[in-house]
Amino acid sequence: EVQLVESGGGLVQPGRSLRLSCAASGFTFDDYGMHWVRQAPGKGLEWVSGISWNSGNIDYADSVKGRFTISRDNAKNSLYLQMNSLRTEDTALYYCAKAAGPIYYHYGMDVWGQGTTVTVSS
Amino acid sequence: EIVLTQSPGTLSLSPGERATLSCRASQSVSSSYLAWYQQKPGQAPRLLIYGASSRATGIPDRFSGSGSGTDFTLTITRLEPEDFAVYYCQQYVNSPPLTFGGGTKVEIK
């Protein structure tokens, strides 16, 4: 079964850091690009970051650029999101999603995890 | 940045009726790079349509996508009870950023 399982969310104070993980199974992880997408409470979907199969292409939304870092470990079938200098507006459910091809753009997101909740509050 | 505007914001329909959802882009989007997703309460989004008109694996044929340039449409020919949900369009032409529309909620009338 193709599956993505996120972890690492929690309650954190503004300005602090958090690292999210996404464990992939059921497919050849290093064949595909990956994404982080977030959804603030009661709001729509916002793309956060994408990474190609070999980490050769990485991009970020302007709202997180310079604060968040996406990475992957193909040997461990895992995707990560290091979130620094967190703000209250980063509060959201964070989804890990698989691209349908080797790069994260030019393909839809065909597999999604159930998400991990990040709450930034003092 | 390509801005996607979805309309209407909410669509109130009865089971068995036809739903027509619109997604308009601020600049031309190659139809190869437009997707539609369905999201039910408490669930992750699910890919319905990619390449503007190709159904993803396991998606029933009552769902269809069409359009080109800046105007795209998702049509659900006969609404089933499980189709009441929020639908998002997304463009993935270039990055950054990949962008989503604001969503259309299809609710039971």
Image (cartoon, coloured by chain):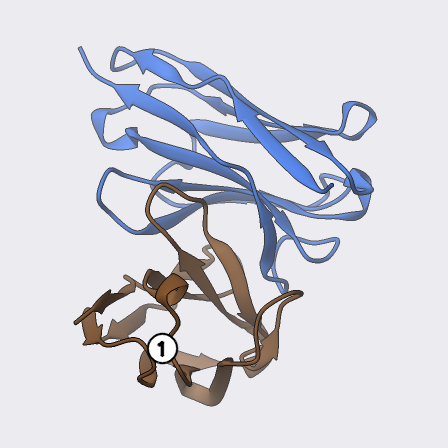
Rendered position, B31 above or below A56: below
Q: Residue A65 appears at what percent x and percent y?
A: 42, 37
Rendered position, A82 above or below B53: above
- Label 1 resides on the chain identified as B
State the residue at coordinates (29%, 51%): A44
State the residue at coordinates (74%, 48%): A32
The residue that label 1 is drawn on is: B25
Rendered position, A66 above or below B105: above
* Mark 1 crowdedness (10 Å alpha carbons): few <14, some 14-19, many ≥20: many
Q: Tell me which chain appears blue.
A: A
Instruction: State the count of labels.
Output: 1
Q: Which quadrant of the view contains residue B43? A: top left
Quadrant holding the N terminus of chain B: bottom left
Q: Which quadrant of the view contains residue B17? A: bottom left
Q: Is residue B87 left or right of A53 when viewed as pictured?
A: left
Q: Residue B99 or B78: which is nearer the viewer?
A: B78
Secondary structure of the residue carrying tag 1 is strand
Q: Residue A11 appears at what percent x and percent y?
A: 31, 13
Three-letter code, disc 1:
Ala
Q: Residue A89 appears at what percent x and percent y?
A: 23, 32
What's the colour of chain B in the image? brown
Quadrant holding the C terminus of chain B: bottom left
State the residue at coordinates (22%, 77%): B13
Q: Can residue B1 be seen in this view?
A: no
